[in-house]
Amino acid sequence: QSAITVGKLKVNLFGAIFGIWEVFWGVFYWYPAMTLYSLLRKIPGDLMGKIDPFRRIPICIGYIWGLLSMTFFGMWPKVEGRENLEGLREMNEKLKPAMYVANHCSWMDIPFVGRIFGFLNYKIIAKAELLRVPILGKAIQIGGHITLDRTNRRSQMKAFKSGVQWLKDGVNLVTFPEGTRSKNSRMGSFKKGAFKMAQAVGASVVPLSISYADKVQPLDYAFPAKASAMFPQAVIKIGKPISTEGKTDDELLEEVWIAIAENLPDSQKPEKDTPVGAN
């Protein structure tokens, strides 16, 4: 479809219609629900804090918004490899908390990863500057997600402590260790030390390979340009959990990097001579 340019970003007819639908549910469902939750957290006695100590309700509110806005337009990716998560299954049938790690080349990566968890609790490790993005910043803050400023040592320590605590509390973590969206869709180097939170508590790392999210919403588009179900179909491949036990930072980084790259299409695999880790 042809597209028009609005400011610095493009919008085609599919994206315009989807955007209106998504914003509608955001304005009349998501924002009021999140605002109400935020107000209830401020009531003296912290009753909501006792009911929902790990801030799972905002995650559920967000997923319902996703169901309302994305399902009708065929926006959900195909999820493969769920059977690999059985390695995290405990005797009580619950999945052990883990750090889920994915490549990053589109805004759609975030809701795509949310599809894996559904109504289960998880927290994303996000760049601190995303707090300034309308709606998204509010979702990050109210949902208890972790923000990180890599130029600020105090922010790094606070993020590390928060991530470790969430894992100890049984909450999954999600990180995009490239640190930003790929400019050419190919997976780049991972930030060194990206998995220290998982290593600190002995949690496994689950590699996620996201394919063709860049075709659904290219870097220069304000909204998705096509449905995820259309060719090429967007897919998330869940890899086998990788143990962090007894491995150095570099060994773990390389093992996860290779596991994700292996399940990406040729158009998204790392370019030759791309270093595994970067500062």
Image (cartoon, rainbow, N blue to C red):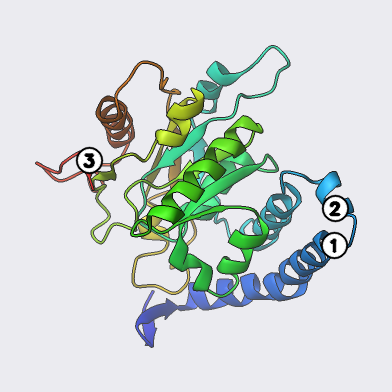
The residue indicated by pointer 3 is 277
In the figure, 37 relative to 229: above or below?
below
**Mark-to-mark CA distance, 2 and 3:** 41 Å
x and y percent of residue 235 in the render? Answer: 44, 43
**Tags 2 and 1 touching, CB below 8 Å:** yes
Q: Which mark is residue 48?
A: 2
Among the 4 quarters of the image, the one containing residue 88: top right
**Residue 109 relative to residue 193: left or right:** right
- Residue at 62% over, 18% down: 89
Say what amino acid the circle numbered 3 marks. Gly
In the figure, 122 relative to 63: above or below?
above
Front position in the image: 39 or 265: 39
Q: Is residue 100 visible?
A: yes
Task: Locate the N terminus and report the quarter of the image it occupies.
Answer: bottom left
**Mark-to-mark CA distance, 2 and 1:** 6 Å
x and y percent of residue 48 in the render? Answer: 85, 53
Front position in the image: 247 or 107: 247
Say what amino acid the circle numbered 1 marks. Leu
- Residue at 50% over, 54% down: 110
**Which residue ends up furthest to the left in the rendered image?**
273
- Residue at 67% over, 52% down: 63
Secondary-structure class at tag 1:
helix
Secondary-structure class at tag 2:
helix
The residue indicated by pointer 1 is 40
**Which residue ends up furthest to the front in the rendered image?**
154
